[in-house]
Amino acid sequence: MQLSFGSYHIVPIQPKDGWNICNFCVANEDRLKRYFPKTLEQNLTPDLSNIFANKKAKQFEAKDEFLFTIRENGTKKLAGLVYIKEVDLDKKQGEFAYCIDYTFEGQGLITSSVKLLSDYAFESLGLKALQIIVHKSNIGSVKVAENNNFTWIKTLNNEFSPPGEDPLNMELYELYKEIE
C-alpha cells in the first residue's frame, strides 16, 4: 500500500525502517521529547530502532496500531511519522498522532497525510470515527485538525503528562465517516 501526494508518499512501517527512524528521532529529539517521549526513547540507537520498527510492523499486521512513514519521493528521506493508534474495532474508532521533521515543517505534509489516511481508515479499516488529541498551544497540530474538518469536541482535563511536567489539559477533535 502506498498513498501519494505531491512529491511525497505514505507507506506502512517496515522492519527495515529502523535506521531511518533512529536518524529522524535523534535529529528531532527536541521536537519529540514533550509529546512523543515513548517513541523517542525507543529510537535513540539503531538497535533500539530496529526493535521498534519490527514491533510496529507486527502491530500493523495484527491491526492493533498503524504506523506510517511519510517519505520524499526522490530521496526517500523520512519526513514524518503518522500513527493511527488507540484502535478500537468494536467502537470503530482510532486516534491520530503525528510528527514532522523540522526540515519539512510548515509544508502541509501532515495535513495532506491525515486527509489521505482518514480516507484509508474509513474505507480500508472500517473505522467510523477518528480523533486528534492536541494541546491548544500546538497551533500547527490544531490547524491539521481544523484543515481536515475535525470538529472540536471538548477539553480533556489532565489528559497527558509530558515527562517531568504536571498533567496538561488537551483538546479533543473528532471526524466521523460521512453516511451516504
Image (cartoon, rainbow, N blue to C red):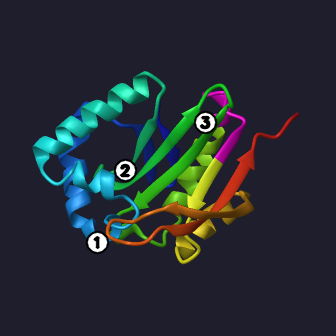
> Is residue 118 among the parts visible in the rendering?
yes
Using the image, tell me which numbered label, if any, was put on residue 120.
3
Tell me where residue 163 appears, x and y as whole percent.
33, 65
**Looking at the rendering, which quadrant does residue 101 occupy?**
bottom left
Which residue sits at x=45%, y=54%?
7
Among all residues in the image, which is located at the extreme top?
62
Front residue (pair 48, 103)? 48
Element on which disc 2 rests:
strand
Amino acid type, label 3: Tyr
Q: Residues within 10 Å of mark 2 (few under 14, many from 20)?
A: many
Among all residues in the image, which is located at the extreme right?
180
Q: Judge whether 97 appears above or below 58 on screen.
A: below
Nearest-to-viewer mark from 3 and 2: 3
> Is residue 77 among the parts visible in the rendering?
no
Amino acid type, label 2: Arg
Using the image, tell me which numbered label, if any, was put on residue 30.
1
Q: Judge whether 149 appears above or below 50 on screen.
A: below
**Looking at the rendering, which quadrant does residue 156 occupy?**
bottom right
Tell me where residue 13 appears, x and y as whole percent.
35, 37
Amino acid type, label 1: Asp
Q: Is residue 29 left or right of residue 151?
A: left
Using the image, tell me which numbered label, if any, was put on residue 71.
2
Which residue sits at x=31%, y=66%?
33
Tell me where residue 62 appears, x and y as whole percent.
43, 21
Q: Judge whether 123 appears above or below 75 on screen.
A: above
Front residue (pair 144, 96)? 96
Nearest-to-viewer mark from 1 and 2: 1
Which residue sits at x=46%, y=45%?
83
- Nearer the N terminus, badge 3 or badge 2? 2
Per the rendered image, the range of residues in magenta is: 121-130
